[in-house]
Image (cartoon, grey):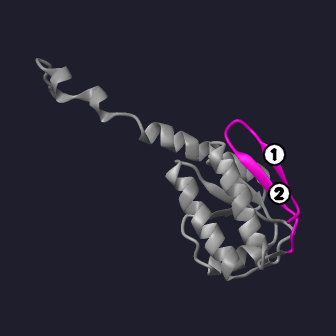
Amino acid sequence: MDCKIERSEQYAVITLKESNFGDDIPALFEEKARELLREDYHNLIVVMNEASEIDTAGVVTLRKLVRLCATGLGILVVATKSDDFTDLLEESKIGDLLTLPTVEEAIDAVFMHDLENEFGAGDDDDYDDDDYEGISETKEP
């Protein structure tokens, strides 16, 4: 499998240089992705600009990696400029897989996902009813 991996503080970018995401490629890809997950990279961006085909093994691998990323509160994003490959991914019905045309948009999606996780993780206990004892609301100006 021909690929390049770039690591950033919040995500890893895997640039896959294969035209077919099938045969032995999905298993090799999953192995690389699992290595990144073990290194605490739960936000993965997969650049698949050269890919034009995907088989059942490829679909299963992407589904599995979507779940593994989500388990670590991360996200898996596929970046591809190919409308045909995007259509193949959409037809595969891989839940929660985000497909975007550029790496820059994928990076933005990772940051937005992380922000949503941060805001969603906040405790609602900050504003208990007990904090407002003795305060009443009036409708008079």
Q: Residues within 10 Å of mark 2 (few under 14, many from 20)?
A: many
**Does residue 66 appear in this view?**
yes
The quadrant in which the N terminus is found is: bottom right
- Percent x, y for residue 42? 61, 48
Local SS, label 2: strand
> How many marks can you see?
2
Among the two numbered marks 2 and 1 on one chain, the one whose residue lies closer to the N terminus:
1
Residue 85, magenta (yes or no) = no
Range shown magenta: 1-19
Residue at x 78%, y 79% (from the top left corner): 23
The quadrant in which the C terminus is found is: top left
In this rendering, position of residue 69 left or right of residue 83: left
- Give above or below for 9 relative to 70: above
- Give above or below for 105 relative to 93: above
Residue at x 76%, y 65% (from the top left corner): 28
**Does residue 100 appear in this view?**
no
- Give above or below for 32 relative to 137: below
Is there a contact, CB below 8 Å, between mark 2 and mark 1? Answer: yes
- Percent x, y for residue 91? 63, 81
Residue 5, magenta (yes or no) = yes
Local SS, label 1: strand
Q: Which residue is mark 1?
A: 6
In this rendering, position of residue 85 left or right of residue 64: right
Amino acid type, mark 1: Glu
Q: Which residue is mark 2?
A: 15
- Percent x, y for residue 93? 58, 77
Amino acid type, mark 2: Thr
- Percent x, y for residue 130? 16, 24
Residue at x 86%, y 74% (from the top left corner): 19
* Nearer-the-camera pick, 23 or 95: 23
* Nearer-the-camera pick, 141 or 130: 130
